[in-house]
Structure formats: C-alpha cells, structure tokens
Image: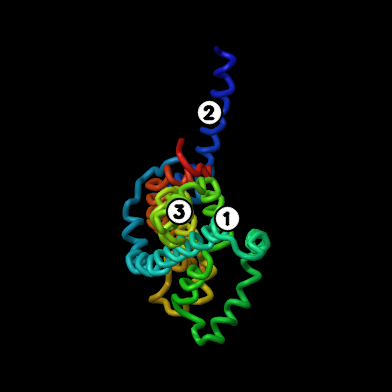
C-alpha cells in the first residue's frame, strides 16, 4: 500500500511546487503594490512589506483612470469574445458535420495557419483597413473576431463536436430539423465546456492585447488597460509601486473570470464530448 501511494505523493508534491511557481509572480506583484520604491529595490528582497502602504492604490488611480480604461477594454473584449465564439462554432460545425468539397483540404489549411506568426499579418491587415478608410478606432480590433474565430478555436470546438455521436443529428433530422436547429438546440448544450474554454482564451487574449490597440488606437480617451499601464514609465524612471498597484487592479477581472469558469475550462481542454 505504501509503494502504491508513493508515486501519488510524488506527483502531488510536484504539482504543488509547479503551482507555487505559477502563483509566485502574482504574489510578488501583490506584495510590491504595498511597498515603497526604495523597499522594492532593497536587496536581499523582503518577502512582505515592512510598512503596508495602502495609499499606493489611490495614488495609482490618480494617474491610472481604471474605470475609463476598463470600459474601453470591455468595449473591445466583449464583442470580440462573442464574435469568436459565434464564428468558430459555425466553422467547427461545418467541418465536423457538413459534407462539402475539399473539406479535408480546408481543415488542413486552417490547422496550417496556426504555424504562421501573427506579426506576419500585421502590415497586410493594416493596409486593408487603410484601403477601407478605417485605419483607427475600435472597429479594426473587433471586426476580425467575426471573420472565422481563429484556427485554434475552430480546432478545439471541432474536436469536441467529433466526440458527439451523430445519432443525435439523425434523430433531429427525422423531426424535420435543419443545420441551424441541430446546432443551436442539440449540439450547443453539449459543447458548453468547449465554448467556455474558447471564451476564456479569447477574453484573456483581448484583455492583455498591447500590439493591436497600439496600432489602431490613437486617441488617449480610447486607451485600453494595457496602454494605460505604459503611463507609469517616464524618461527619468518608472514608478514601480504605482505600476504594481495598477497591475493588480488590471489582473483582478481576468483572474476572477478564470476562477469562475475553471471547471468548464478544464472539461473543454480534456475534450470529453459526452459525460458517461
């Protein structure tokens, strides 16, 4: 019995160490947000502040209008997440359930597009928006989310759909259901974990996006949270205590959303089509 439990204890210890390694940067950011700049630079570093400076947060808010940046970020993130979930589900359903010419070739091309670096497409996409007369603002950041949903998201949902028996589709067709009804009424309730996973991935992607807003947003009042964090960097140094406080406020919504959807996120990654 002891030898049987030893590997489990070893794996649990390893998982605990890796978990602490992942959480430690967040702890370091949180403790630094209550320190002064001199104490942050102190060597050897202190694990906890000698004096807890709760005033760092009001001071950060005087430079970092979190409410305005939050609204701007959500204005981009929420429609984009909706667009990615919608279009990736439609594309995945077509690849998993609909027969059409060269379907395997299209699927291979979609998977192959994952190998293309995102930076390669920046200039062509920007020139396309310039040609359309809308090179700045929120539209160039939101509209692409409604044009496919991304290769990885399509792959994730498609693999989930492939694990669902086709007998459900056939039963719905006997009742006179078409593709839209089968997708919405039959399959969507079964692929909820995959959709939540896609939504979490998309939310974190757009929430932390720096390059996109940097290219397309030119008005300060439209800045996102990621752009606002750059305001703490000056020509004569960086106010680290304020940037740590602002970073804690910026990370909190994403962490809260992940914790709320953690159960479905794990189920979606495991790709368990139907519960037994």
Q: For this rendering, which residue is in front, 228 or 256?
A: 256
Residue position for label 2: 12
Residue under numbered circle 1? 155
The numbered disc on residue 121 is none
Residue 249 place in picture, x, y as percent: 38, 56
Which corner quadrant holds the N terminus? top right
Q: Is residue 195 visible to us here?
A: yes
Residue drawn at point x = 55 percent, y = 54 percent: 158
Is residue 71 depicted above or below 26 in this figure?
A: below
Give the image location of residue 49, x and y in percent: 40, 44
Which badge, 3 or 2, comes first in the chain's sequence?
2
CB atoms at circles 3 and 1 under 8 Å apart? no
Q: CA distance from mark 3 to mark 1?
A: 12 Å
> What element does badge 3 sit on?
helix
Relative side of 6 to 195, left or right? right
Q: CA distance from mark 3 to mark 2?
A: 30 Å
Asked whether the residues under the numbered discs 1 and 2 touch, taking CB atoms below 8 Å apart as contact, a structural biologist would say no
Q: Is residue 97 above or below residue 69?
A: above
* Residue at the image position 52 percent from the left and 51 percent from the top: 161
Q: Nearer the viewer, mark 1 or mark 2?
A: 1
Q: Residue at x 62, y 66 (%)?
A: 118
Number of marks drawn:
3
**Percent from the top left, x then y, of residue 51?**
36, 45
Which residue corresponds to mark 3? 195
- The answer, for residue 242, to whether it is visible in the render is no
Whether residue 124 sits left or right of residue 236 in the image: it is: right
The x and y percentages for residue 31 are 42, 46
Q: Residue at x 45, y 76 (%)?
A: 139
């Amino acid at each position: 019995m002891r030898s049987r439990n030893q590997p489990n204890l070893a794996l649990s210890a390893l998982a605990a160490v890796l978990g602490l390694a992942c959480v430690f940067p967040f702890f370091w950011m949180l403790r630094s947000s209550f320190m002064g700049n001199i104490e942050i630079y102190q060597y050897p570093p202190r694990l906890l502040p000698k004096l807890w400076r709760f005033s760092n947060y009001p001071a950060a808010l005087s430079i970092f209008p979190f409410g305005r940046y939050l609204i701007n970020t959500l204005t981009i993130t929420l429609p984009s997440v909706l667009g990615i979930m919608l279009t990736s589900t439609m594309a995945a359903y077509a690849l998993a359930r609909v027969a059409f010419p060269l379907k395997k070739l299209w699927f291979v091309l979609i998977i192959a597009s994952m190998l293309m670096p995102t930076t390669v497409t920046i200039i062509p996409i920007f020139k396309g928006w310039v040609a359309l007369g809308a090179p700045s603002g929120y539209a160039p950041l939101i509209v692409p989310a409604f044009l496919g949903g991304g290769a990885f998201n399509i792959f994730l949902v498609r693999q989930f759909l492939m694990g669902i028996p086709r007998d459900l589709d056939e039963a719905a067709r006997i009742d006179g259901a078409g593709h839209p009804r089968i997708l919405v009424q039959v399959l969507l309730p079964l692929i909820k974990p995959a959709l939540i996973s896609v939504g979490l991935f998309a939310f974190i992607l757009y929430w932390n996006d720096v390059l996109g807003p940097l290219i397309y947003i030119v008005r300060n009042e439209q800045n996102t949270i990621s752009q606002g964090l750059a305001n703490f960097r000056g020509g004569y140094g960086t106010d680290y205590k304020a940037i740590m406080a602002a970073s804690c406020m910026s990370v909190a919504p994403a962490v809260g959303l992940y914790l709320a959807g953690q159960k479905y996120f794990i189920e979606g990654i495991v790709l368990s089509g139907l519960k037994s």
